Image (cartoon, helix red, strand yellow):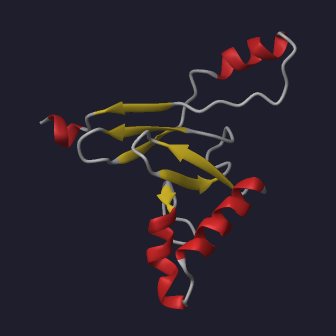
Amino acid sequence: MATSIIGFSGPFSAEDLHLKVKDKGIDLVTVYRSLSTFTELGLLTTVNFQDGTLRYEYSCTSEQGHHHHIICQKCKKVDPVDFCLVQDQEELIAQMGYSNITHKLEFFGLCDQCSA
């Protein structure tokens, strides 16, 4: 995955972004407000790894328009999963009459280094 304009190649927290911009006089509240606005506009999507920290990433970062993640439970390394096992189920749900269907799916495990 290519590094973004702000230097993050994957999901980042508000605190991560604040560390990059605080020397420019931007406070953490402004970062949170900006992230909220960018999410509402659809420029960012939220990612929740169930660790108490909400993360953000650019929308449409893969060919499919979305991707999933695998997170190492020990070192917290995050890798993108660029295939979707749920896409066919979304089509079945659409046949039930639903529209604007979305989903989020995260995988958790141990990376090869932590498994060794």
Q: Nearer the viewer, residue 69 or 32?
A: 32
Give the quarter of the image for residue 99: top right
Furthest-right residue in view?
A: 97
Quarter of the figure that contains the C terminus:
top left
Q: Residue at x 43, y 47 (%)?
A: 52
Q: Nearer the viewer, residue 4 or 105?
A: 105
Q: Nearer the viewer, residue 21 or 114?
A: 21
Q: Is residue 106 left or right of residue 57?
A: left
In the rendered image, the vertical position of residue 91 relative to residue 53, given as above or below? above
x and y, in percent, of residue 103 in the image: 65, 30
Q: Is residue 78 left or right of residue 25?
A: left
In the rendered image, the vertical position of residue 96 relative to residue 26, given as above or below? above
Q: Residue at x 39, y 43 (%)?
A: 51
Q: Nearer the viewer, residue 72 or 84?
A: 72
x and y, in percent, of residue 108 in the image: 36, 32
x and y, in percent, of residue 47 in the image: 54, 45
Furthest-bottom residue in view?
A: 24
Give the quarter of the image for residue 109: top left
Furthest-front residue in view?
A: 29
**What is the total number of numbered labels drawn onto the structure image?**
0
Q: Residue at x 83, y 9 (%)?
A: 96
Q: Is residue 102 left or right of residue 80?
A: right
In the rendered image, the vertical position of residue 60 relative to residue 82, given as above or below? below
x and y, in percent, of residue 11 in the image: 50, 54
